Image (cartoon, helix red, strand yellow):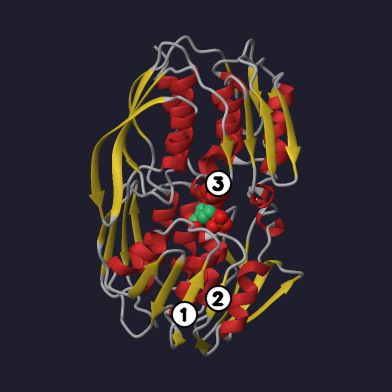
Amino acid sequence: MIIKKAERLRGEIRVPGDKSISHRGVMLGSIAEGTTLLTGFLNGADCISTMECFREMGVEIKQEGEEVQVRGAGLRGLRKPGRVLDAGNSGTTMRILSGILSGQPFEAVLDGDASLRKRPMKRIIDPLTEMGADICSEGGFAPLRIRGGELHGIAYESPAASAQVKSSILLAGLYAEGETRVKEPFLSRNHTELMLRAFGADCMSEGNTACLRPGRSLHGISIRVPGDISSAAYFLGAGLLVPDSEVVIKEVGINPTRSGILDVLKRMKAEISVENTHETAGEMAADLIVRSSSLVGTKIGGEEIPRLIDELPLIAVLAAVAEGQTVIRDAAELKVKESDRIALTVGMLKDMGAVAYATEDGMVIEGSGSLCGARIRTDKDHRIAMSAAVAGLIAEGETEICDPECVRISYPGFFDTLEGLKH
Ligand code: S3P
């Protein structure tokens, strides 16, 4: 895929549904009683992996584009899968589904693609084992063989702020005897807690601790999935960098545990307005309007990191064009995402002529105001590919993105939407 310098971007778009909420809608819908209807569902490869796993366990799921109907099997209604459950490229599928499988009276094997097989699973194996599950793996990596057991609730102090870990433990807690608590160093995205409540579960949150008391059954609901702020981020970035631009992004989820990018962009002096704020199934959504802006560097770290972890490669691109230095700290997690996002982001920026270097837990970028086209390695990581596309819009010459089809993981129509804004 070749990206050329754009003159200006104008228009109104919708981005696909939130990935985290789409996964959770299928998962909770599958173990609820009655029907769950998801509209605005993300029809991307990761969420399709989740759907396929539940179909393999006997759940009837009908999908027509962005509309999904799940006929819940109830908490105890899943069937032993006839084959290996394939999570594909999706860490969310593997980690959260492991929690549900830990409570089942059967054995299942969960596997994934080459990237997922390299991602750490000990972070869920340890607490789920402590709850009573029997999980075999080779060195803490997929494939995972999970034999569900009689679980008991635990009070877990998570070493990392990870929504996947928290969600996995909370969903196992639905099957456990007694209460399950998860405390995080910082609050990670709370879609699971919000959705569990909406389905009727006894789930409470206080500060950085979430608590689940078992005993109630879940009941299917209708969910309108808001647009994914992690996907909207590329268009916020593109609208800011390309001169003479104005882009309206309709109905984007702005849950405060996800909207760290808006705070960072404000500090970078971006002109973004948030309009028509409203609530949909316990989640906040709004229209975002972005105009070209001259950005300045900033410092990002601490509690802000889990609120924008997936947006950091894109933020790094913006930092390379901003005035002054940007420092990203406390983000070592980036090394174990779909790719090593610290190495690939710094590599991309350097190849495009920027001054950037990796640190132990993040990166430092010296804003230079301009970039030049290059051939960008993505390691099939969707977020690296889309960040590179934004950089390509303002780079001198052509930018070639390797393996561009990887955007199908979270945003199948990304390049078409981008093209449609060029006027
Ligand atoms: C996700 C949580 C985040 C995020 C991932 C989706 C989720 O990962 O990076 O893209 O849906 O729970 P961690 O919870 O591991 O930080």
Q: Residue at x 39, y 11 (%)?
A: 423
Q: Is residue 8 above or below residue 170?
A: above
Residue 241 percent location from the top left of the image: 50, 19
Q: Secondary structure at mark 2?
A: strand
Residue 194 percent location from the top left of the image: 34, 62
Comes first in the chain, label 1 or label 3: 1
Q: Is residue 370 left or right of residue 101?
A: right
Cβ–Cβ below 8 Å for labels 2 and 1? yes
Label 3 lies in ligand 1 vicinity (Cβ under 8 Å): yes
Label 2 lies in ligand 1 vicinity (Cβ under 8 Å): no
**Quadrant in the picture for the N terminus:** top right
Cβ–Cβ below 8 Å for labels 3 and 2? no
In space, the residues marked 1 and 3 are separated at their CA atoms by 26 Å
In space, the residues marked 2 and 1 are separated at their CA atoms by 8 Å
Q: Residue at x 48, y 27 (%)?
A: 237
Q: Amino acid at mark 2?
A: Tyr
Q: Secondary structure at mark 3?
A: helix
Q: Amino acid at mark 1?
A: Thr
Label 2: which residue? Answer: 156
Instruction: Count neighbours of disc 3 (C-alpha within 10 A) and say few if under 14, some if 14 to 19, many if 20 or more.
Output: some
Q: Residue at x 47, y 9 (%)?
A: 7
Q: Determine if residue 60 is in view.
A: no
In the picture, the disc for residue 309 is 3
Q: Nearer the viewer, residue 392 or 87?
A: 392
Q: Is residue 214 above or below residue 419?
A: below
Q: Amino acid at mark 3?
A: Ile
